[in-house]
Structure formats: C-alpha cells, structure tokens
Image: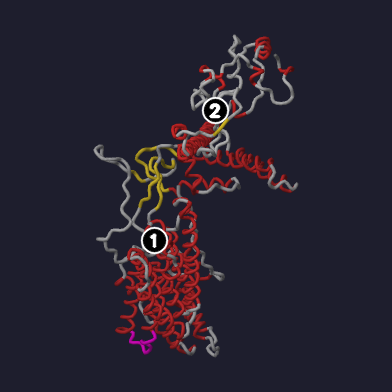
Amino acid sequence: MNMHQIPHQLADPRSVLPEVSQQTLAWPPRGNTRQSIFSMAPHTSVNHDPPQTAEQTYKYYQERPPMIIAAPWQYYPVPPYPTYQGLNPFHMVPKPQSKSSDQSQTQTPNQHSTHNNNYSAPSSAATLLSTPSLETLATQSSTATHSKRGLARDNKQSQTNFREKQLVDLAHRMIQVPLEEMAMLIKGSEEKIEKLQSMGLRHARPVRAAESEKKQHRQLLAMVVLLRSVEVKESAVSPRNRIFNSYVELCKEHDIPPISNASLGKLVKLLFPSVKTRRLGIRGFSKYHYCGIKLISDPDCIEVFASPATDSTVQLPPLYDEHEDYSELSIGLNLDPQLFRHFFEINLKYTVPSMNELYQMFPKTDHEKLHGMEQVYSAHCQKLFQYIKFMEVQHLLDEMESLSSQLSIEQKSLLSYSDVVSWILKCDDELYGACIKYLSKTVFQSAPDQVHNQLKNINVKFMDALKSMKLPSHVLKEKELRAAAFLKITSRLSRVILAATNFAGHITHSSIVTNLLSEWKMLTLDTLVDRDIHCEQKRDITSILRTDIVFLFNDLQKLSYHDDNIKDNVVQLLSLHISKIPSKFEGINPRVFLLVSNQVIDSIMRQLSIEVQVGNFSIWWSLSCWLNEFFNFLAEFGGFIRFVSDNSFEETPV
C-alpha cells in the first residue's frame, strides 16, 4: 500500500501496518520517548547513509518508507499535564481482560493496545505510583529551560568573542593606515546616517547598519591609536586619564568625536589582556591607573618594582584609616597669572560633576539608588552655591542641616562605598572653588559692612553646621578637611576686604595722595633694597618701587574725589595694579615671593618710621597691611583653584 491508497481521513494504523506487533505500538513506547513515525514503520533494508551524489539523493528519497498518518498520542510522548488518576486523558490503560480471553493478548498495566477501544483510568495503586508526579515534571521542565538559556548565553558569548577577535586582528592589519583615511571613513558613515535620516529612515535597517559601521570605524581608530602610542611594560603604571587625553587630542586634530573613557578602557583590555586597572593615590584623591602599559612619549611614567618574593600586583591603600589623622589638606600656593582670569568672569556658573563613572562600577540593581543620590546631592550643592552667592547665611545653615533628612536609607547605604564618597568630595571641591571665584570679585571694590559681616558669619558658623550634619563619621571627616581649606581662603578674603576698606577710608582728597607721593620720594630705595633684600631679583624690585608705585600714586591723584563711589574707585585702581605685580616675577616660588614681598614692605615701613618720620604713618600702615593680605590671598586663591583643577573627577571607569 502506498500513500495514494490512504484515504483523506485519518487512516487506521492497523490497516496500514498489519504486521506491526502490539508490543511495538504499546504506549508509552520504550527507550527514546521521542520516536518519529518513521521509526514505527516495519523494518526495511533501506540504506540510511547520507547521499553523496545527485543520483544517490534521488534514490534515497525514492526508497524512503511511506509516511503514516495517525493520531498524535499514539506516537509522541505524553504532554506534561497533571497525571493524577482520572485527570489525564492521554494516560490510558486497558481494562482487565476476562479469564476467557486469549492469554497471548494479556498486557501489563503500563501498556495499552491499539486493537482495544475500551479504555479507563488507572485503577491500581501501583499504576498511580508509576505515573510521574508534578514535581518531577516541573523539575525536568525547569532543567530543560535553564539548559536552553545557558546554551543561548554561551552562543551569544561565543559570537561576542569571535567579533572581538576579528576587531583586534583588523586593528593590527590597519596599523599602517594613515589616521586621516580612517577619520574620513568615520565622517563618511556620519554623512550616510544623516542622508538616510533626512529621507525619513530614522529607525530603518539601513540606518542601524550605518550606525554599526560608524561604531566599528571609531573603535578601529581608537585601537590603532593605542597600538601606535602605547607600549607594554610590566613595571609601568600610567594614569588612565593621561592615555585617554592623548587619544582625545588626536581626535581633535582630525575633527572626529572621541569615544568615552570607559569604552577606550574596554579596548585597552582587548588589545592588552594582561593590563590591570588599579586605583592609586591618597584617600579621597585616588585615580585610576593602567598597570602594565605606558605612553611611548611619556618619560614621567611611574615604575613599580616588585620583590621576587612578593606579588607584583599593586596593593591599594585602604580608603579609611581609623588611626590616621589628617589635620589639613595639602594645598600649595600658586601665582600663575592665568588663574586670576576668574576675577573677571561675568557669568560664573557652578556645574555639579557627573556620576557617570559610578554607574559603570555598580550593578544595575543599584543604579536607581545612585540616580537618587545624584539628584539629591546635586540639588543640595546648587542651593549652597546660591545661598553663598547672595549671602543668605541662615538659609545656608538650614540647608546643611536638612541634607540627612533628604537622603533615603538606601541612598545613605551608598556612603559606605569609597567611590561614592570620592564623588561627594569632588562635588564639595567644585562647590568651594566656584564660591571662591565668585567671592574673589569683592577684592576689586569696597564691600559694604553687611557683606563683610555675612562673610564673617560664614567663617564662624559654617564649620559648626557641617559637624552637626547627620552623616557617617568618615564622610564628615573628609568634608571637614575641605571645608577648613575653603574657610581659610574666605577668612583671608575677609581680611583683605577689611584692610582695603580701612585704607580707602583715609583717601578722601587728592591732597592726601600728593603728601603720600612726596613722602615716598624721600625714601632711599637703592640702599633699602641692597641692605635688606637678599634675592636675585633686586633690579626688578627696585624698578617696581621707583616707577610702578609712582605711576600708581599719579593715577590716584587723577580720581574725582567728589564722586560718591570714590572708595570703590580707589580700591579697584590699587587692586588692579597690585594683582599685576606677581606676573613680573614669573617662575619664582610663591613662598619665596611672599617672603620677599613681606620683607620689602617691612623695610619700607621701618625707614618711613625711623629716617623719614612721616606724618601719615597710619595711612602707610593700613596700606602695608592691605598689601600683605592681598599677596597672601592671591597665592592661596591660585593654589586652591589649581588643587580643584588637578583633582578633577574622572569621567568613566573600566
């Protein structure tokens, strides 16, 4: 019988396979439960070897056994339905045979015959116990599901590894390709994307393909730059930002957007698998370093030499040492004229550092907490800046006190992580730097008493409010160090404002300036400098005393002393002239400059008091106090701004 003889309705397998024994058709089938309908067919001598030629293929399909159409539950395993007695319609056993029945037709409880159409549910305890339980079926199903997921995950990982290997091989082959050509490929991809998007294909497959191509070109360019500019050295330790900045400079030269620091770090790991990323530095100011590579053009690379008996891995110091005491931050002095441009910034804004770096370090389950922390503390810092800017001291203190109540318990738990604390400290540094830049403008004007009093209140009450904040002790300790550095400068600023106001109060008429100039010309400046000043810049100092100071008094004489803003005009004129003096000693150590300037002012005051015996000594004394405070403020201001700039928060970690 062939397939053409089978009627359209379901054929009875007894008529199709009369020679098949009942043992073969018994349910459930023995062995592999997933037997195909071809395995149920009678045994034939068909060659099942795979065909090799077209002729063999044709013969193979001609000799295949006919397809048998039958009820699905006769040849396929039982679905995982509940197998309790009487509930599973597919689990059927034959009724017990009578004594008069043929003994050869007797079947076991685990079998059923297709020749018997009378079925019933299992009636014996043994049959029920032999039925798989729900727990067994659930376990088998769960195991199969996890197996499939694991296989899919392994396949995806294999594909990723293969693509990464291809990318590395391609980068090595393109190492000799000029960067200009690679930059043109990136720009071509960008133009292609813009053209497709202008046609309304924003999310179409061609756009996605072009974006993938652009991403690959950018990765190749970054890898080629790394291969050209970086060398492997086991004892080398290079700052991560230094390598990233080198790559960014090349991108700027070719006018292409760079990839992120974190993405570049992943490419570093692909090209140099032995490289480790370590965080090095003192607590609160540690930075990420690559251990095992260095820039070829970097002579200042750190070398780490490990003892043969020890592990060569760089060991990081603990972030918090309960037995270590830091009395103040190490903030130096700086008189770089470029730093004083902040005095004249009109639209000064404060921007809170981003937390993008931390999102790469924490699992996705913590991202919501990090986002909440970022929002709360960013808003807190913005409010503090506004309150200091407008001298609203009471609002400032209230905001500091309420910070703890604004943080949830989950967000407070993040304060136990060193990276989160470092981000908070960086926010504080940026906040204090922005406040100092804004407040420093007051050195060029005669500040009213209200401003001076409010600034004095900040100096007195700010630290007490900070110590009363309900934050972990290690966080408070670090915040106190930064607040102390900030208050040191605001205290110096307050002294400068007060000294300037006192001096400007004496200059009420041009005749006073004329008397001061005549007394100044009575000084023997050459003798004074030669006798009391011990440095190599004696000629420059003498030139400033002879010419610059005289020009300054001449400008003061030209002011209109009938103007209501005469005090502001006096302070502004003197401050502008004095702030330019450090630039005449470029390259000198700031501490040496402060010592020499203090010695010059002290020597002038002694000569005015002993030899000249001037009648305006109180005015000269107020001027000398102002000069000393002003020079100290310039050096401390420059040091703090440089400190904030050098310890800028890194963008993204690996």
Distance from disc 2 to disc 1, alpha carbons, whole Å, reads 71 Å
User: Does residue 536 show up?
Assistant: no
Q: Amino acid at mark 2?
A: Pro
Q: Is residue 615 magenta?
A: yes
The image position of residue 307, as x and y in percent, is 26, 40
Taking the spot 44% from the left edge, 79% from the top edge, the residue there is 393
Q: Which mark is residue 415?
A: 1
Q: Amino acid at mark 1?
A: Leu
466 sits to left or right of 443: left
Which of the pair 37/376 is nearer the observer?
37
Whichever of labels 2 and 1 marks the residue nearer the N terminus, that label is 2
Q: Quadrant of residue 321?
A: bottom left
Work out whether residue 158 or residue 95 is closer to the camera in this orientation and state it: 95
Image coordinates of residue 139 in percent, x first then y, are: 46, 38
Q: Which residues are magenta?
A: 612-619
Identity of the residue drawn at 59% across and 16% down = 20
Q: Which quadrant of the view contains residue 54? A: top right
The residue under label 2 is 94
The answer to whether 348 is drawn above or below residue 21 in the figure is below
Furthest-front residue in this view? 100
Horizontal relation, residue 418 to residue 30: left or right: left
- Packing grade of label 1 (10 A; few <14, some 14-19, many >=20) is some
Quadrant location, the N terminus: top right
Viewer can see residue 388: yes
Residue 217 percent across, percent down from the top left = 59, 39
Mark 2 or mark 1, whichever is nearer to me: 2
Query: Relative to 112, is 104 above or below?
Result: above
Residue 304 in the image, given as x and y percentages of width and height: 32, 43
Q: Is residue 117 magenta?
A: no
Tag 1, which secondary structure? helix
Residue in front for this viewpoint, 368 or 374: 368
